[in-house]
Image (spheres, rainbow, N blue to C red):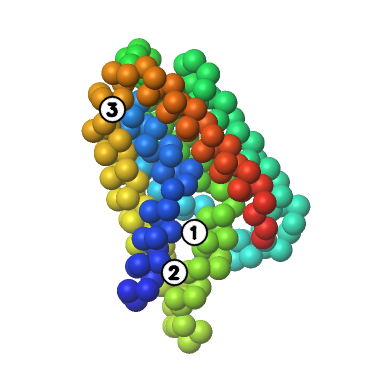
Amino acid sequence: MSPDFLLTSLIVVASPGTGALVTIAAGLSRGARASVVTAFGCTLGIVPHMLAAITGLAALLHASALAFQAIKVLGVAYLLWMAWATLRAGGPLKVDTTEGAPRSDGQAIRHAILVNVLNPKLSIFFLAFLPQFIARDEARPALLMLQLSGVFMAMTFAVFAVYGVFAAALRERVLAREGVLRWLRRGFAAAFVGLGLKLAIVRP
């Protein structure tokens, strides 16, 4: 496995995105354990894109402008919904001090999976990036892509978990200041809107 692949994958994973924001929000609102669960869900959300790339479905998706646009619209709509939910009282991404009715692990995982499943940029990544590290004469390209994808997923989980646990470590300090909470909610909402707008201009 080439150092170039590892370095580039680390840069891609560490770059702030939807999954990282969702994991950080989980750490701030519900603590370290919730952030790790969310990081796991984001990692699972990569699997459909990986399987699509391996089976050739990703190429078919990007060849179909209608299918690509449909997934992109769903992704943008979901990001805008998360921006709204972050701001409203009692929203799933609201950072507060309440302890009642906590989100279950299953709910957190399903939400995190949906975040990444509705992100067509991931399938673009697997279609355009991974094949560059597979030689034309590779005897078992699908197996190698699985191995590379596994490394990418492991990096995703590790980096997101670090983000979330670090956010959780600051939780008490953040929760103690109402002004910080208010601006934090606005910041998350603005970030989700920005990611939605960025996704809206993505081309296959």
Name the element at disc 1: helix
- Does label 3 or label 1 sit earlier along the sequence? 1
Q: Amino acid at mark 1?
A: Met
Mark 1–mark 2 CB contact (< 8 Å): yes
> Label 1, label 2: how many angstroms apart (C-alpha)?
8 Å
Q: Is residue 21 visible?
A: yes
Q: Quadrant of residue 175?
A: top left
Classed neighbour count for the residue bearing mark 3: other residues with Cα under 10 Å, few (<14), some (14–19), many (≥20): many
Classed neighbour count for the residue bearing mark 1: other residues with Cα under 10 Å, few (<14), some (14–19), many (≥20): many
**Residue ranking furthest to the right:** 66
- Does label 1 or label 2 sit earlier along the sequence? 1
Where is the C terminus found, in terms of image quarters? Answer: bottom right
Name the element at disc 3: helix
- Is 31 left, or right, of 112 in this rendering? left
Residue found at x 67% / y 58%: 203
Q: Taking 12 as reference, is 142 above or below it?
A: below
Q: Which residue is mark 2?
A: 145
Q: Which residue is mark 1?
A: 50
Toward the viewer: 103 or 140? 103
Name the mark nearer the viewer: 3 or 1. 3
Residue found at x 46% / y 52%: 46
Name the element at disc 2: helix
Toward the viewer: 150 or 72? 72
